[in-house]
Image (cartoon, helix red, strand yellow):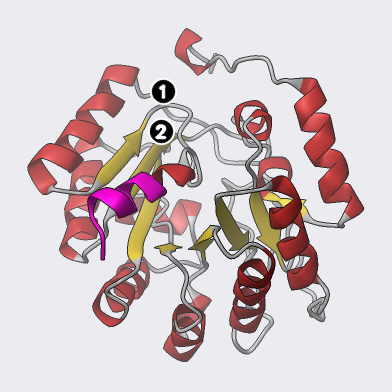
Amino acid sequence: MLKPQWLRVKAPQHERIGDLAALLADLKLNTVCQEASCPNIGECFAGGTATFLIMGPGCTRACPYCDIDFDKSVRILDPTEPERLGEAVSRMHLKHVVITSVNRDDLVDGGASQFVECIKQVRRKSAGTTIELLIPDFCGNWDALSTVMDAGPNVLNHNIETVPSLYKIARPQGIYKRSLELLKRVSDGWMDVYVKSGLMVGLGERDEEICDVLVDLKSNNVDIVTIGQYLSPGPKHLAVERFVEPNQFEWFKHYGETELGFLQVISSPLTRSSYHAGEVRRLMELYPR
């Protein structure tokens, strides 16, 4: 299926990309921007932002939409990773940082302790930086979730990814209701934290199903939602079933913000989980907790 014109990406600024890529290589850090072949890498790297991928690059789940490598082996966490991440945030002068991880189902706490250490190091080296975590479901280990949340992130993101009817196909090791419960637990237990989630479209879902997911997210007190077009990384991954037109993305944004009352819905063909993530600082000023 050929990509439509509205999915063309601006040519990246190679000099800036090279500078940041060199810094990340020097500190031996991974980013989702690179590992997941994000179409916005040019725009985000040119703006001096990146989403750091910890505990990777291999993931213990093999979701067929994702371009991150599958690795189910037991791997010891690198104790130096949090300090190197904090150093990168400081050297990049980031006002807002997003920290995510691969799924680490091989670890008892799913890697919660590593998230905590990363928060500590960012706060130590760059105190004014707001911190957004994009976390896995920890297999429903709510003690691990509490460990992460008690470390004090400003934003907690956990992606719902797709509609319930496609979970067996796209997210076979995920559980829709478990992800909703995670989001609700965060909103109920840590009321000063902004709660965020996101989903892909174009996997074969109906627009009505997307609306139902938005209602579910709002019912579980999510504040911010991202909606973007799924783009297949390659022939071994799920195929794109449809390209959603830009005006439909605008309609999702209107429906979410105007009718359901989300603080923000970022909805466009090239939107990804961390796209324009730094805008949350403006929301914090408008809607302080």
Q: Residue at 80% of width from left, 75% of height from top?
A: 73
- Return the residue nearer the eye: 125 or 58: 125
Q: In which quarter of the image is residue 119?
A: bottom right
Q: Determine the CA span between mark 2 and mark 1.
A: 6 Å
Whether residue 82 is visible:
yes
- Return the residue nearer the eye: 163 or 246: 246
Q: Residue 202 carries which label?
A: 2
Q: Is residue 241 above or below residue 281?
A: above
Residue at disc 2, secondary structure: loop
Kind of residue sitting beneath label 2: Gly
Q: Which mark is residue 243?
A: 1
Q: In this view, does 125 lie above or below 274?
A: below
The 10 Å Cα crowd at callout 1, few under 14, some 14 to 19, many 20 or more, is: many
Q: Earlier in the sequence, mark 2 or mark 1?
A: 2
The rendered magenta stretch, by its main secondary structure, is classed as helix
Tell me whether circle 2 and circle 1 mark residues in contact (CB < 8 Å): yes
Q: Residue at 68% of width from left, 72% of height from top?
A: 121
Relative placement, left or right, of 253 versus 171 is left
Range covered by the magenta-colored residues = 280-289
Relative placement, left or right, of 172 versus 48 is left
- Return the residue nearer the eye: 92 or 147: 92
Q: Residue at 26% of width from left, 37% of height from top?
A: 206
Residue 257 point in image, percent of width and height: 18, 41
Residue at disc 1, secondary structure: loop
Relative placement, left or right, of 261 versus 111 is left
Q: Quadrant of residue 255?
A: top left
Kind of residue sitting beneath label 1: Phe
